Image (cartoon, helix red, strand yellow):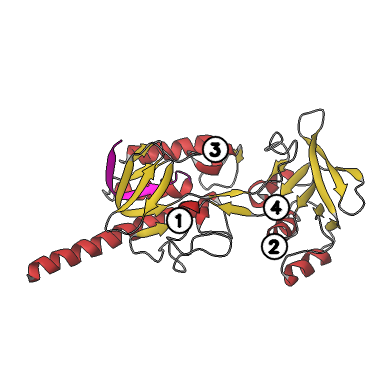
Amino acid sequence: MATHSTRMLIIGSGPAGLSAAIYGARAGMEPIVVQGLQPGGQLTITTDVENYPGFRDVIQGPWLMEEMQAQAEHVGTRMLWDTVVSVDLSGPKFTATGDGGDVYEGDTMVIATGAQAKWLGVPGEQELGGKGVSACATCDGFFFRGKKVAVIGGGNTAVEEALYLTNHSDDVTLIHRRDSLRSEKILQDRLLANPKISVLWNKTVASFEAGTDGALASLRLVDTQRGEESMFATEGAFVAIGHAPSTELFKGKLEMDANGYLLVEPGTPKTAIPGVFACGDVMDHVYRQAVTAAGTGCMAALDAERYLAEREFAERAKVAAE
């Protein structure tokens, strides 16, 4: 067991955490990144990335995260492989304890633990991930232009995904297990008025079925009222039943919304505890993109630097006054 100290402790190593590390390292803060269970975040399980600025051709998610990590290390970040199991935000130093007992302490803390898409947990779902099954229409919808696609869910996320997909497809079907939607009324009105979208009510997905080419070809559906099974042919299926932010560590320690996302001062990554910042999908339930996560990571590092500068100036002023 060891103690690792830094001016900026970053928990999480996706685009938000690594962007914070790059900016923090360039400011001389010698950040430590505790990488967590999924180093690199959700992009490490994403294949084709076509919407991250700066790359004309399609790039691979794992490669992009390897490059981000290498850049962070190149400018002075320490990457440590560990999983945080508890945190202490009482200050003046903020600490995190790893599952092996190592302690990480920082003058500031940047929380970039991300969020994970909720999945149905039925056969074929994970096996066909990236082969027709996705949890992000904004990320992957472009790959299905001109194709028949389905969206599974009935809340705001599902309706928004279905509406977005009409930019690429003229044949979008929303599949919902109930006979009415849970989304906001204005979204329902837009969806039901869109001629490109049809709705299958009272249906659940029992499995995702591959075709002869190994990609998604159809969904096996079950009627929730009659129990009858049917097959629905589709080339793309978007699971849109919500996301779960990784905020279990911070329950009772930081303010959260009803869905568990960390609350920050509007327009900033500042939590209610001075010196503790949240960035990326752990505080963003609206955009959930790699580029927006990276942007808030940058903001967290800049605000952390300013926080320390102001604190150190105040301490020097206090000493001078004595």
Residue in the picture at 31% in, 50% down: 8
Using the numbered discs, state the Cα–Cα distance from disc 3 to disc 4 in whole angstroms: 20 Å
State the mark number for residue 44: 3
Which residue type carries mark 3?
Answer: Thr
Looking at the image, tell me whether mark 1 or mark 2 is earlier in sequence order: 2
Where residue 197 appears, as percent x and y from the top left, is 82, 58
Which residue type carries mark 4?
Answer: Ala
What is the chief secondary structure element of the magenta stretch? strand
Which residue type carries mark 2?
Answer: Asn
Residue 309, picture quadrant: bottom left
Secondary structure beneath label 2: helix
Is residue 169 in sight in this rendering?
Answer: yes
Q: Is there a contact, CB below 8 Å, between mark 1 and mark 2?
A: no
In front of the other: label 1 or label 2? 1
Q: Which residue is mark 2?
A: 156
Left or right, residue 276 beside residue 2: right
Residue in the picture at 72% in, 57% down: 158
Looking at the image, tell me whether mark 1 or mark 4 is earlier in sequence order: 4
Left or right, residue 266 beside residue 94: right
Q: Is residue 5 magenta?
A: yes
Total labels: the figure holds 4
Q: Which residues are magenta?
A: 1-14
The C terminus sits in image quarter: bottom left
Residue 121, picture quadrant: top right
Classify mark 1: residues with Cα within 10 Å, few (<14), some (14-19) or many (20+). some
Which residue type carries mark 1?
Answer: Phe
Looking at the image, tell me whether mark 2 or mark 4 is earlier in sequence order: 2
Residue in the picture at 35% in, 60% down: 303
Secondary structure beneath label 3: helix
